[in-house]
Amino acid sequence: MNAVVFDVALTAYIVAAAAALGSLFGRREDLARFARLLTAAGWVCHTGAIILRGVELRRAPVLTLAESVSVVIWVAVLFGLWIEYRYGITTFGAFFLPAILALGLGLPTGLRGLALEPQSQSGWTVVHVALILVGLAALVLNFGSALMYVLQERQIKAKRRGAFYYGLPALETLDHLTLVTLTVGFPFLTVGLLLGVLQAGRSWASLLAGDPLALFSLVMWLVYAATLSGRAVGRWRGRRAAYFAIAGFCVLLATLGAGALFHGRHGS
């Protein structure tokens, strides 16, 4: 039953993404409103799907890779709706919803049921996973805002007002949004990974050996740590920070892909 409700939510996200893109290209405010309503409706269905899965399995629904990606999407959509409301960026859905779909469309067919070992399914594991998921959700939105920055900057530098120009906010707003999503997501990611390291140190002989998901997670953390350090110390702004945010999202996708395709300590 939870899979059916999730499919309904995913369908709503797909149609909402199409409407959001239509509003961006066609400069149609009515389509933007329709996209927001559908996104909110999809999020409500998604909430129901997560609750149903937890009730059916009688455990927290975050212990397989597919469940984790589902929760990342759920949190990211909630954050995305809040950003649209808080910053008044009506076209934000055209950028974060396709990223959401890139994750969500892999769930029914592409991602195998990657489950943690039963002895590892402790309360600390749930906290470890939950913190990472909140961090990843914010970093998905970090990618969306960075992509908007790059597109808007190119239009301004080219001195021509393209299809996106009127639908995107000022560069200062986008740079601020990129920084906010990074500073929110990185601490959650760091603490979540640290808890994982402490747990792995107790039960695994080697932390990274034989576990592609852990290895790629470390690379992902290093990319985001470099980005945040560059902003804090090197005063990176604008385009450079946006490029690093996009690179971080590519590593995030590679991390999830490594967890889905390769065997390791996180699953079998």
Image (tube, helix red, strand yellow):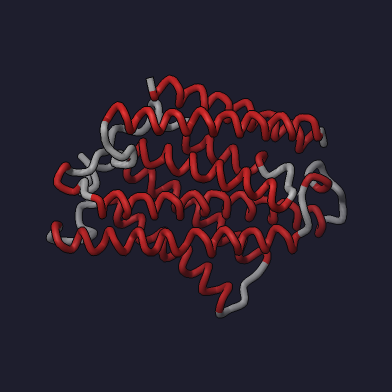
Instruction: Give the residue at x 45% y 29%.
Output: 48
Front one among 78 and 159: 78
Q: Is residue 167 left or right of residue 148?
A: right
Instruction: Give the residue at x 51% y 22%.
Output: 8
Front one among 255 and 44: 44
Name the outermost residue toward the right: 160
Q: Is residue 64 left or right of residue 138?
A: left
* Location of residue 178 by image quarter: bottom right
The quadrant of the rendering that contains the N terminus is top left
The answer to whether any part of residue 6 appears in the image is: yes
Q: How many marks?
A: 0
The answer to whether any part of residue 260 appears in the image is: no
* Location of residue 258 by image quarter: top left
The quadrant of the rendering that contains the C terminus is top left
Q: Is residue 164 left or right of residue 234?
A: right
Q: Position of residue 134 (x, y in %)?
A: 45, 51
Q: Position of residue 109 (x, y in %)?
A: 38, 26
Instruction: Give the residue at x 56% y 54%.
Output: 246
Q: Position of residue 19 (x, y in %)?
A: 70, 29
Relative to residue 6, is residue 263 depicted above or below? below
Q: Position of residue 50 (x, y in %)?
A: 40, 33
Instruction: Give the residue at x 28% y 33%.
Output: 113
Relative to residue 118, is residue 189 depicted above or below? below
Q: Is residue 151 left or right of residue 234?
A: right
Front one among 23 and 5: 5
Relative to residue 138, is residue 30 depicted above or below? above
